[in-house]
Image (cartoon, rainbow, N blue to C red):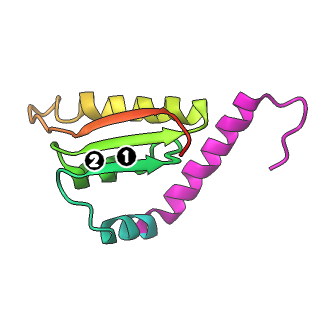
Amino acid sequence: TNLSASTSNEEYDLSFANYLDTHFQAMKPEYEKMIRMVGIERGSKVLDAGCGGGCFLPMLSELVGPTGHIEALDISPANVKAAQQLAHHMTTSSGSDSGNSQQHPSIHVQIGNV
């Protein structure tokens, strides 16, 4: 991708994040199969390094269950913001309309580099 002088880093981050999300959706069945093969168990602590916009958070949340923990890191502030919003939505809205209270693992998203 060519970053021109007239394009801000934030615009570039958002554009690249959108590309990654589109790519994830196209490859989702393969990615899900690979993640499930890893053997993540309930109660696990998982690091999602380079989490992007948080595409893997729902599946990781399902795998680690309510006693697990997910630590998600990304170097892009735009990606971290998107992943934080997704994590917040996942942990506050699920099951509230139907009366079923689905529990979620703790999810912490922050700017970071490994």
* Residue that sits furthest to the right in the current view: 5
Are there few (<14), some (14-19), or many (20+) residues within 10 Å of tag 2? many
Image location (x, y in percent) of residue 83: 46, 36
* Residue that sits furthest to the front in the current view: 114
Given the image, on which type of amino acid does mark 1 rest? Leu
The residue depicted at 73 percent of the width and 37 percent of the height is 12
Image location (x, y in percent) of residue 72: 42, 41
Image location (x, y in percent) of residue 67: 15, 43
Q: Secondary structure at mark 1?
A: helix
Q: Secondary structure at mark 2?
A: helix
The residue depicted at 61 percent of the width and 35 percent of the height is 76
Q: How many marks?
A: 2
Q: Report the side of 85 relative to 61 (left or right).
A: right
Q: Quadrant of residue 85?
A: top left
Up/down of 58 relative to 99, above or below: below
> Would you say the residues marked 2 and 1 are in contact, meaning their CB atoms lie under 8 Å apart?
yes
Given the image, on which type of amino acid does mark 2 rest? Ser
Query: Which region is colored magenta?
Result: 1-29
The residue depicted at 53 percent of the width and 44 percent of the height is 52
Image location (x, y in percent) of residue 114: 53, 46
Q: CA distance from mark 2 to mark 1?
A: 6 Å
The secondary structure that dominates the magenta segment is helix
In the image shown, does 26 or 32 lie closer to the viewer?
Answer: 32
Q: Is 13 within the magenta?
A: yes
Are there few (<14), some (14-19), or many (20+) residues within 10 Å of tag 1? many
Which label is found at residue 6? Answer: none
Up/down of 59 relative to 52, above or below: below
Q: Is 98 within the magenta?
A: no
Which label is found at residue 57? Answer: 1
Which label is found at residue 61? Answer: 2
Q: Report the side of 73 relative to 107 (left or right).
A: right
The residue depicted at 39 percent of the width and 48 percent of the height is 47
